Image (tube, helix red, strand yellow):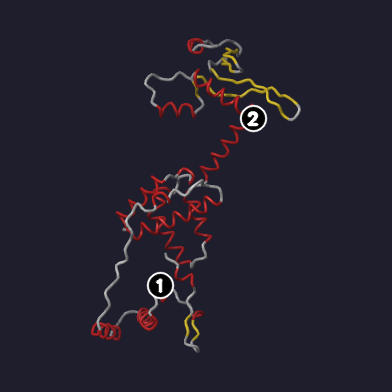
């Protein structure tokens, strides 16, 4: 078996040469001074046994005082000490025992990671919004909210990497800056987006669920009803209104039908049957923006 001193002091020669550690692991020393870990293995494919070599990574000397974060980054860059290379050999051997080529396994993991990185929260959010059977104005309002409140926080992130802590940060920040109503809308939207991501195998869980009750309930503050005198004054003020004609008509429509403001301004002529004195409001018009 190799020692770290042997690995560290190995000098380059005119041709590549090997320093064998055992059980298939060896250190290849190249003429340019590069030292690379290799794992030689045999794998059975159908009825034949094939010899192959797995490029584990480069030899590395762990700096004194190296932090756990730095060590993790170094290993992600495939730079391993002798002890770490032995651990990688064990992982590769386990794959070989299952009939899996470790080189092919690494390639598939890399492709999957690239796909995960390309699947950002914002990309899934826009897809989710496009699938909704909502009026255009409703989609615009929802997108504006996401762009203002959610995307700046987690929009560019791979959706699979988002945790409940990230969601909680979005919610608490939104509640402070925009109020509980907006925070609640953001929570519902994010949960819907993650529902789509989970159902299409682009996320494992909905991170909104664990923090769904983190904010206090948004209690609706109802306006007091107008008195009879106040109603009369309001109608007289409308009669004297000198603004846009459309505004007056919209008000009269709301007054006569008790509809919502958005239902009045988004109404279409096709919804009215004047002969029957009937106005049919599409259900989707009531979707919350």
- SS state under label 2: loop
Residue name at image x 46 percent, y 71 percent: 285
Q: Give x and y (percent) for residue 4.
A: 48, 13
Q: Which residue is mark 1?
A: 262
Q: Give the left or right position of residue 228, taking residue 193 as reference.
A: left
Relative to 114, residue 99 above or below:
above
Q: Which residue is mark 2?
A: 98
Task: Say which label, 1 or 2, has the lower sequence index.
Answer: 2
Using a 10 Å C-alpha cutoff, classify the residue at mark 2 as few (fewer than 14 neighbours), some (14 to 19) or many (20 or more).
few
Horizontal side, residue 107 vs residue 135: left or right: right
Q: Position of residue 14 (x, y in %)?
A: 59, 10
Furthest toward the left, the residue is 229
Name the quarter where the C terminus is drawn: bottom left
Which of the two residues, 2 or 58, is positioned nearer the viewer here? 2
Which quarter of the rendering shows the N terminus? top right
18 horizontally vs 126: left or right: right
Residue at horizontal 27 percent and vertical 77 percent from the top:
225
């Amino acid at each position: 078996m190799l020692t770290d001193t042997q690995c560290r002091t190995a000098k380059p020669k005119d041709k590549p040469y090997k320093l064998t550690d055992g059980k298939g692991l060896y250190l290849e020393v190249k003429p340019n001074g590069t030292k690379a870990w290799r794992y030689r293995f045999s794998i059975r494919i159908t009825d034949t046994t094939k010899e192959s070599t797995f490029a584990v990574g480069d030899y590395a000397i762990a700096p004194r005082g190296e932090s756990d974060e730095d060590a993790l980054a170094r290993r992600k860059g495939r730079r391993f000490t002798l002890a770490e290379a032995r651990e990688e050999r064990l992982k590769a051997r386990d794959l070989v025992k299952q009939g899996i080529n470790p080189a092919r396994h690494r390639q598939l993991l890399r492709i999957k990671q690239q796909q995960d990185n390309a699947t950002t929260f914002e990309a899934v959010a826009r897809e989710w919004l496009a699938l909704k059977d909502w009026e255009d104005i409703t989609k615009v309002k929802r997108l504006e909210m996401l762009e203002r409140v959610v995307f700046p926080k987690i929009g560019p992130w791979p959706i699979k990497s988002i945790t409940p802590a990230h969601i909680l940060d979005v919610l608490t920040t939104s509640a402070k800056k925009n109020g509980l109503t907006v925070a609640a809308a953001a929570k519902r939207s994010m949960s819907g987006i993650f529902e789509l991501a989970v159902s299409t195998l682009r996320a494992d869980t909905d991170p909104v669920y664990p923090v769904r009750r983190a904010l206090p309930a948004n209690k609706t503050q109802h306006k007091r009803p107008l008195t009879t005198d106040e109603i009369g004054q309001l109608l007289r003020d409308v009669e004297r209104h000198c603004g846009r004609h459309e505004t007056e008509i919209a008000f009269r429509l709301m007054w006569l039908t008790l509809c919502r403001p958005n239902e009045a301004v988004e109404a279409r002529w096709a919804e009215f049957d004047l002969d029957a004195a009937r106005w049919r409001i599409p259900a989707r018009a009531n979707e919350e923006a």
